[in-house]
Amino acid sequence: MKVQCPTCQKDVEWIASNVDRPFCSARCRLIDLGEWASGNHAIPGPSLDEALMSEQHPELEQTPPTHH
Ligand SMILES: [Zn+2]
């Protein structure tokens, strides 16, 4: 029996020796747990707002380019 890794969609053998099933690896398992823990599955993070805010610093845009 095969399942798909919820993190990377890779085919994973559903066998007792695969302790990370349904994930393909411990790495994918930890990634998924981390996303659930930080709420990324349900709520968009603040990173978009922070990106928009960081673009609104006119002093950065007015910095003259470095001439060589
Ligand atoms: Zn995976």
Image: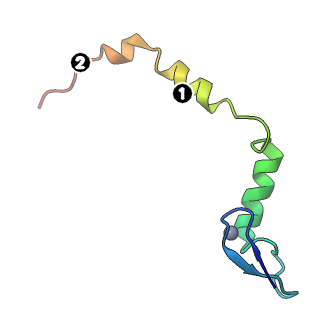
Screen quadrant of the C terminus: top left
Quick one: label 1, few (<14), some, or many (20+) residues within 10 Å?
Answer: few
Residue closest to the eye, 47 or 15: 15
Question: What quarter of the picture does the N terminus occupy?
Answer: bottom right
Amino acid type of the residue that numbered disc 1 sits on in the rendered structure: Ala
Residue 20 position, x and y percent, is 81, 75
Which mark is on residue 64? 2
Counting residues from the start of the chain, the first of labels 2 and 1 encountered is: 1
The residue wearing badge 1 is 51
Separation of marks 2 and 1 at Cα, in angstroms: 22 Å
Of all residues, the one furthest to the left in this rendering is 68
**In the picture shown, does residue 16 fall above or below 6?**
below
Q: Residue 11 or 54: which is nearer the viewer? A: 11
Q: Quadrant of residue 16?
A: bottom right
Q: Quarter of the image holding residue 7? A: bottom right
Q: Residues within 10 Å of mark 2 (few under 14, many from 20)?
A: few
Question: Who's the residue at 46% across and 20% down the image?
Answer: 55
Q: Is residue 25 left or right of residue 60?
A: right
